[in-house]
């Protein structure tokens, strides 16, 4: 089930000119659920097939199982558990979850709600007297960064340093050696090294010293699975630092953009604050922060939608396309916070279901509720707004709005 058009479609999707609205291209792509690319990789774009892949034990998340090495893979350090397979993935995820959520710390996320509300309120207070604000720079970025810095024990004053590193790392995720300058990959590799060195320096100070931050807990934990090595702690902290704010920035920003494009829903949220829970779930389906899982590797030959994918092949999963698949969701291009049976792919699925999903949900629920409640007559300055370069983690780089 391949066509000669599918490779060209992928190029158009990845091209920046499509960033503001890739959804019509996703619809075309779904006509070929499994599309063979010129480089031998496969793109999967329909809900059923993506969900099947995410739950398939014959698929690997470890780049080392690809028959064709990923650019720069040999220069990067120990992978985080999101890029490992069982049993190592399961062990490291359990070690991390002991200090991040249930069953060992069940109240961590929900217990942060008052603090999250205070941070949000303080940021919105700073809007006073401003006719125009940037939802990204003035709100959606500083909010989750403040939260993840607090959780990890990263000094807030160091945020400008790792913002540069994170931007370079994200930009390098979709590196294409055919079209991109080598500098793009080199910058990402160097940023990864710099960030890990920085986290290693913080970790050295945590050994043998009690504390409540995650770095300290990781460094001094002796649970039933043993203790993470320093390299494993750094990889986990690196993952949490990047994923812990990049996806939430996009989710909040995409959420505000979507509400401003749907003023009746915005007004309804203002009148019915409890609507925010299903609204955020619909947002994760309709305008998710993560559009693409760039690769999985086949452990052995597998068959997906009547297409045989050879062992070692790179597989790209188009999550955002799957969440708008009309064979799974009725009227998928309509934003409907009352949607039932909304098992979207916004945070993935299977054993790699987003580790920080509960925190991102709560942050976004609080952020959108307070923005809608307190902003007076918000209006978009530009539609579409300018977008970030990455097609993988998709969201506006700025979202200027005016208020009355």
Image (spheres, helix red, strand yellow):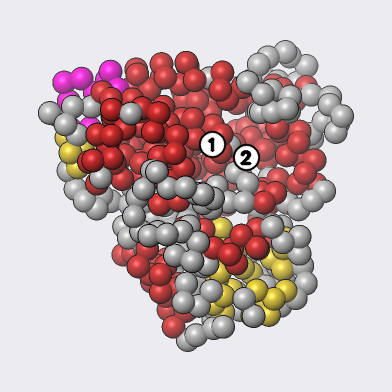
Asked if one can make out residue 230 in the rendered structure from this viewpoint, the answer is: no
State the image coordinates of residue 42 (x, y, percent, origin top left). 59, 73
Residue at image point 36% right, 32% down: 368
Disc 1 element:
helix
Spatial CA distance of label 1 from label 2 is: 9 Å
Q: Residues within 10 Å of mark 1 (few under 14, many from 20)?
A: many
Residues in magenta, as a range: 124-134
Tell me the quarter of the image containing the C terminus: top left
Per the image, is 128 magenta?
yes
Quadrant of residue 305 in the image? Answer: bottom right
Residue 59: give x, y in percent of width and height: 72, 63
Q: Quadrant of the N terminus?
A: bottom right
Q: Which one is nearer the viewer's eye here, 176 or 106?
A: 106
- Vertical placement of residue 400 versus 317, above or below: above
Q: Which of 20/57 is in front?
A: 57
Mark 1 or mark 2, which has the lower sequence index?
1
Q: Is residue 147 left or right of residue 263?
A: right
- Who is closer to the viewer here, 269 or 16? 269
User: Which element is circle 2 on?
Assistant: loop
Q: Which residue is drawn at 52% across and 67% down?
A: 46
Q: What is the number of the mark on residue 355?
A: 2
Q: Give the number of the mark in front: 1 or 2.
A: 2
* Label 2 neighbour load within 10 Å: few <14, some 14-19, many 20+: many
> Label 1 belongs to which residue?
244
- Residue displayed at 56% across by 75% down: 34
- Against 244, is 30 above or below? below
Asked if one can make out residue 13 in the rendered structure from this viewpoint, the answer is yes
Residue 244 among those drawn in magenta: no
């Amino acid at each position: 089930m391949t066509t000669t058009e599918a490779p060209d479609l992928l190029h158009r999707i990845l091209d920046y000119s499509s960033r503001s609205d890739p959804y019509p291209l996703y619809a075309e792509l779904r006509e070929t659920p499994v599309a063979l690319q010129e480089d031998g990789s496969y793109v999967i774009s329909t809900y059923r097939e993506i969900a099947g892949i995410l739950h398939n034990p014959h698929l690997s998340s470890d780049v080392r199982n690809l028959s064709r090495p990923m650019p720069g893979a040999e220069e990067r350090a120990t992978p985080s558990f999101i890029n490992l397979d069982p049993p190592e993935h399961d062990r490291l995820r359990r070690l991390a979850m002991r200090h991040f959520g249930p069953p060992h710390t069940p109240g961590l996320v929900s217990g942060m709600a008052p603090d999250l509300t205070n941070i949000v309120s303080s940021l919105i207070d700073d809007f006073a007297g401003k006719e125009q604000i940037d939802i990204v720079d003035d709100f959606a970025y500083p909010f989750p960064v403040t939260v993840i810095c607090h959780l990890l024990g990263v000094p807030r004053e160091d945020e400008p340093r790792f913002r540069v590193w994170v931007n370079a790392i994200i930009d390098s995720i979709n590196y294409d050696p055919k079209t991109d300058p080598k500098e793009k990959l080199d910058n990402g590799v160097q940023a990864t090294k710099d960030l890990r060195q920085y986290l290693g320096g913080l970790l050295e100070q945590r050994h043998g010293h009690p504390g409540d931050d995650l770095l300290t807990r990781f460094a001094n934990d002796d649970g039933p699975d043993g203790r993470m090595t320093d390299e494993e702690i750094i990889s986990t902290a690196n993952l949490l630092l990047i994923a812990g704010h990049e996806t939430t920035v996009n989710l909040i920003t995409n959420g505000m953009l979507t509400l401003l494009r749907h003023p009746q829903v915005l007004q309804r949220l203002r009148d019915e604050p409890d609507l925010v829970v299903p609204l955020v779930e619909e947002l994760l389906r309709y305008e998710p922060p993560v559009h693409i899982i760039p690769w999985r590797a086949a452990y052995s030959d597998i068959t997906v939608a009547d297409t045989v994918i050879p062992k070692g092949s790179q597989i790209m999963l188009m999550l955002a396309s799957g969440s708008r698949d009309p064979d799974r969701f009725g009227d998928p291009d309509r934003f409907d916070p009352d949607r039932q049976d909304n098992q979207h792919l916004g945070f993935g699925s299977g054993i790699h279901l987003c580790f920080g999903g509960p925190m991102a949900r709560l942050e976004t629920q609080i952020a959108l509720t307070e923005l809608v409640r307190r902003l007076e007559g918000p209006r978009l300055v530009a539609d579409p707004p300018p977008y970030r370069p990455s097609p993988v983690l998709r969201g506006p780089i700025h979202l200027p709005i005016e208020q009355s």
